[in-house]
Image (cartoon, helix red, strand yellow):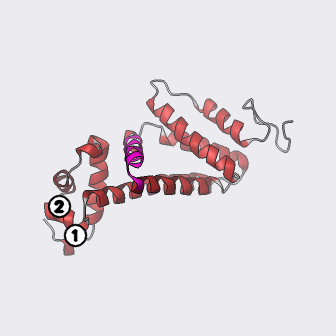
Amino acid sequence: MATGRTDPDRRDRIIDAALDLIADEGVAGISHRKVAARAGVPLGSMTYHFASMDELLHEAFTRFSGTIVAVFEDRLGAAATPDEAREAVADLVHHLSGGNQRELILTHELYTLAARKPAYRELTREWMSRSRRALEWHFDAATARQLDALIEGLSIHRALETEPHDRALTVEAITRITVPGNSDGQVPPTGTRRK
């Protein structure tokens, strides 16, 4: 097995292994020994790189939340018009709920920790703040906050339903929030506003 000097990726492998274990067994099932075995590192590497399991979990969930924010930024950064931004939001809902059980489980495990521990609550607040900032590239702050909650809620509902709703329902919900004066989900012709 390589030493730390010749294994510069060891810390990253430990974090990745921790996330994989959390996805497989939940936070309650994680241990230094299991993470070390999954990462293929000596057990002593765990305490060398992380002062505690809590530090490892915090680093792992920080990395995970960063990957989700990167998806937000990528999708919303590519949008050039309000209609494209609404489509990007719909893409986010369907991407986040599209069968990636790992992401769904990691999200819920983080929420459970955040409900119990202030440090994780702060981590989720930072995640939401960064997501909203990306939404604010196209929408005002209040609308971005509503869209962030909608994305989260619809993603969870779609992922957990036996027959998830289709894209048309997602687009209708987004339109209701983002088109001024709109309550029926229909997008008005360009340049007009509903009374």
Query: Can residue 96 be seen from the camera position used here?
Result: yes
Element marked by disc 1: loop
| Mark 2 closeness class: few <14, some 14–19, many ≥20 residues within 10 Å | many
Segment colored magenta: 104-118
Q: Is residue 39 left or right of residue 90?
A: left
Question: Which element carries disc 2, helix, strand or loop?
Answer: loop
Can residue 39 be found in the magenta stretch?
no
Tell me residue 82's x, y (percent): 72, 48
Q: Are the residues flagged by discs 1 and 2 in contact, CB closer than 8 Å?
A: yes
Residue type for callout 2: Val
- Looking at the picture, how far across and down is residue 177, in whole percent? 69, 40
Residue position for label 1: 7
Q: Which image quarter holds the N terminus?
A: bottom left
Separation of residues labelled 1 and 2 (CA atoms) = 10 Å
The residue under the point 64% across, 49% down is: 144
Q: Is residue 129 left or right of residue 10?
A: right
Residue found at the very far bottom of the displayed protein: 5
Query: What residue do we see at 55% from left, 57% from top?
Result: 130
Where's residue 94, x and y in %? 53, 38
Q: Quadrant of the C terminus?
A: top right
Can I make out residue 64 in this image?
no
Q: Mark 1: few, some, or many residues within 10 Å (few <14, many ≥20)?
A: few
Residue 121: percent from left, percent from top: 44, 52
Camera-nearest residue between 74 and 116? 116
Q: Main secondary structure of the magenta part?
A: helix
Q: Quadrant of residue 62?
A: bottom left
- Magenta span includes 117: yes
Query: To which residue does mark 2 refer?
Result: 41
Please state which amino acid type lies under the numbered disc 1: Asp
Compared to 127, does 91 lie above or below? Answer: above
